[in-house]
Each structure stands twice: as structure tokens, then as C-alpha cells.
Image (spheres, rainbow, N blue to C red):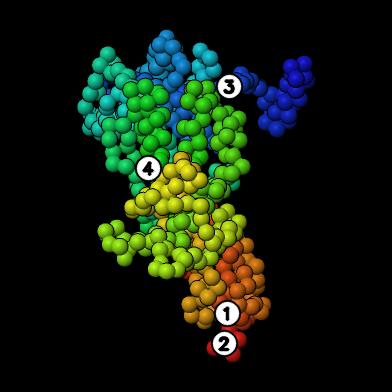
Amino acid sequence: QAGEFTDALATCRREAKAAFDNDIILIEKYLTKPRHIEVQIFGDTKGNVVHLYERDCSLQRRHQKVVEEAPAPNISDEFRNNICAAAVRAARAINYHSAGTVEFIVQGDDFYFMEMNTRLQVEHPVTEMITGQDLVEWQLRVAAGEELPLAQEDISINGHAFEARLYAEDPAQNFLPQTGRVQHFSYPEQTQYMRVDTGIEGGDKVSAHYDPMVAKLISYGENRDQAAANMVELLEDTYLTGLPSNHEFLSNIFDSDTFLAANIDTGFITKNEQDLLPDNYGLADTDEIALAALYYLLGLQHKSTEENPWNAHDNWRIGAEAYKRKFKLVNKGEIIEIDSTSAILVSYDDGKITAMINGEEITAQIVAYRDSITIFLNGRVVDMHLLAPESQDDKAGNGQIIAPMTGKIISVLVSAGEYVEKGQALLLMESMKVEIPILANCSGTIENMLVKSDEQISDGVLLVDITPDEEQE
């Protein structure tokens, strides 16, 4: 409380004096709704310094940026001129040359210097989008001793741009970074309105040794609303599977009325957590379950695109009712039993499925890997795994249990030397946000337990070695 400040200050000074023999205290202004706004500057060896306007980087989690935009929304021309001029003065004061970013904490019309990053930053594409300049080319030219390509009066703002960072992380687990193999990654071709910067493709591994960002999704529009709409389209046409990501979380940001109204500050994600991370985050709803059931019941993973009646998957039979097999799906650790579906197939082509569900036509994208699928529908990303019948769990019954896919061991349920029955759960494994039980393919004694809890494992790795009962050998 304000009335307690004097006593608290005295206590702080005593502690500082005792610890450091110095009781000088620095007091910082407390900001209740701070924004993070930074200015892109460039200097050359000829003494020229310019700015390429500002970016708003307020949307952060754990002090790491998630969404950036340029120009900053809801600021006046006077404020823009003042903050950009301050950044240029800072660069001139140290005779700076090359690319750099001067970062400020902002509240209202007041801004405070925070730091300078002496490099080209991750979010530089949004500045390139609104200025039409290639900042990497600028940096190379300056490094070669050339003069800046443009004077300040030749640089202007045109339109609005967003960048969304696609991370291999699980927002539902406090944005825990994820590692593993990317099974599938695709996105639209670059246009003047959409761009994707990435260094990965399907089959690549996300390592624990680097930042978990796997791609930068950039959108452009003539104004902020159009740029946001283009980002929604870009997110809807981008598909990443194989390990958890913040894809659905990003979609929820661009579906937020508060965000679209540019009511943003560095506390935005925390204050809007219930909307961005709702209770049903990643959980299959009735539509997604119906689509998954339709997909498996009709065997669409094997569907040919050829125009051939023998390739039809409508379960039609002469003089008999359509055969419907029973099976189980696993979503976020929950087992869903399937023997029918309320969905009626309208069309299916290369993973794009359209079906009638309760009188409404719904279109989604399904990306499959072995017995797992990911459904991308209206910004949601839902993973499901086919829990195969016991007869299919064991192909050889020789006691060697192999990892069916890349994932993480959640729990080890048995120990070496322990006797297990065929079909008994040995491990719980998490992959693609799905918890999967790993079952014994025979009865016998655990010879070796080769993994431990929280261990990240790859597809095809030997997990458990069982010595089968003699009668099974």
C-alpha cells in the first residue's frame, strides 16, 4: 500500500547496505497496462541513420513474443514521430551502423527506453511488408560499406502486417516446449498478402537444443482488419502435425474481439486466458468425433481419387445392410467408442473432407499419420488416435514392444522382473497431444524396461522387452 512505502524503502536500504555496503536504491515507475513498442533503425558508415517505423510486440507469454504487428495500432502521428525520432537519436549517439531495434515500454503517450537489440530481429518481416524494403539486403549493403538505400523522406508506411510465431509447445501445459519429429508441415504459397518463413519440413526433428519456434506466419492487408482476416486464412491453410504446437492458440487470438479491437498490452494473454485457452482446448466435440468416425468407417485413408465405382467407400452392399465395424478412438487420454456416425460424406479429396452433420455442411482438413489423425476445423486443432483391436496390437507376439510413433513417455506402469498379461498396459505415451496406452503383446516377464517417465522417444524405438511364457513361444 502507498502508506507503507516509507517503511518498505527503509527496510530495503538496510538490506542493501548489509549485503553490498551500498544503500542506494533505484525506483522504477510502475505501469499498469504497458505496451511493448520497438522502432526499426538502420545506420551506415557514412553517418546516416534512419528509422523504418515501429512495431507493436505486446502479445507475449513468459516475456517471449507471440504476435507482432506494424505499424503499432492506436497511436497518434505525433507519438509515432516522437518515439521514432528518439530511436534515431539513440543510434546517432553511439555512431551505430547496421540493423538495430530500439525497444520501449509504453503507457499512454509516455514511452521509456528499455534496451537496444543490435541485430535484425525475428519480427522484421512485418516492417518489410509495410515499407516494401528488404532489410536483409540493407544489412548486407551496409556491411559492405555502402550508403543506406533510402533517405528518411523516402520511407513511408503502406498498409498493415502481422507476424504469428508458430511454436512447438503446448499452451495447455504453460506453453511447455515440445521436441520430436514433425510428421507433416504444409502451408499456402507465398503471395503479397501471405508469407511463411521456416526452416523445417515433414520428417524433420524439433530439437531441445534450439528455440521451439518452427515457423513465422506473416500476413499483410491494406488496413489492420484486412491483415487480421488474411492471417486467419493463413492459419486455416497451415497444417503441422507430429508434435504439439500453439496453432489453435494463435487462431483463438485472431478470433478475439478484444484483440481485433487493438485493446492490447503485455498482459493480454494472461487477462484473456479463458478465451484463448478454453476448457475444451484440444478436446474433440461432436462434429469432430463425427468426422473422425466417418473417416475411419469409410476407410478414407485408403480412398483413391480415381473415378471408379470399386473405389467407393459408402458401405453399400447388394441385398444386405451396410457393414459397420466397431472401434475406439483416443483424444486427450479419453477413449471414445465408435460404431456409427451422424455424418454423411459429401466429398473427400486429399484430406479435405466435406460432410453433412445434423443438416449442416461442414468442411475440415484431416492429416493422417499411421493410426493417428489431426482434424483442422474452424481454427481448432484436434488430435485422435485409433485404438486398434487387441488382435492387431500384436503382429508377432514376440515380446518386443516398439514405439508406434514419436512422443513422450508419460508414465511407466510396470518394472523389470514383473509378470504381465497379454493386453496389460505397460506404459502411457503422449504423442500429438494424445495419451496412448502401450500394451503387452504377450504374457510373460518384463526382461528390460528401456525407457523412463518424461523421456522423449522416436518412432520405432524398442520400449520394452518381454520374455514370453513358454507355451506362447
User: Label 3 belongs to which residue?
Assistant: 33
Question: In front of the other: label 1 or label 3?
Answer: 1
Contact? badges 1 and 3 (CB < 8 Å): no
Question: In front of the other: label 3 or label 2?
Answer: 2
Q: Earlier in the sequence, mark 1 or mark 3?
A: 3
- Helix, strand or loop at disc 4? loop
Q: How far apart are marks 1 and 3 (CA)?
A: 60 Å
Contact? badges 3 and 2 (CB < 8 Å): no
Contact? badges 3 and 4 (CB < 8 Å): no
Instruction: Residue 98: give x, y in percent of width and height.
Output: 32, 28
User: Label 1 belongs to which residue?
Assistant: 442
Q: Distance between the residues labelled 3 and 2?
A: 68 Å
Q: In this view, does 72 lie above or below 180?
A: above
User: Label 4 belongs to which residue?
Assistant: 237
Q: Which of marks 3 and 2 is nearer the N terminus?
A: 3
- Helix, strand or loop at disc 2? helix
Q: Distance between the residues labelled 4 and 2?
A: 50 Å
Which residue type carries mark 3? Lys
Please name the residue shown 58% across and 31% down the image: 272
Q: Residue furthest front?
A: 319
- Helix, strand or loop at disc 1? loop
Contact? badges 2 and 1 (CB < 8 Å): yes
Badge 1: residue crowd in 10 Å (few <14, some 14–19, many ≥20): many
Which residue type carries mark 2? Gln
Badge 4: residue crowd in 10 Å (few <14, some 14–19, many ≥20): some
Please name the residue shown 33% across and 22% down the image: 222
User: Label 2 belongs to which residue?
Assistant: 472
Q: Distance between the residues labelled 3 and 4?
A: 34 Å
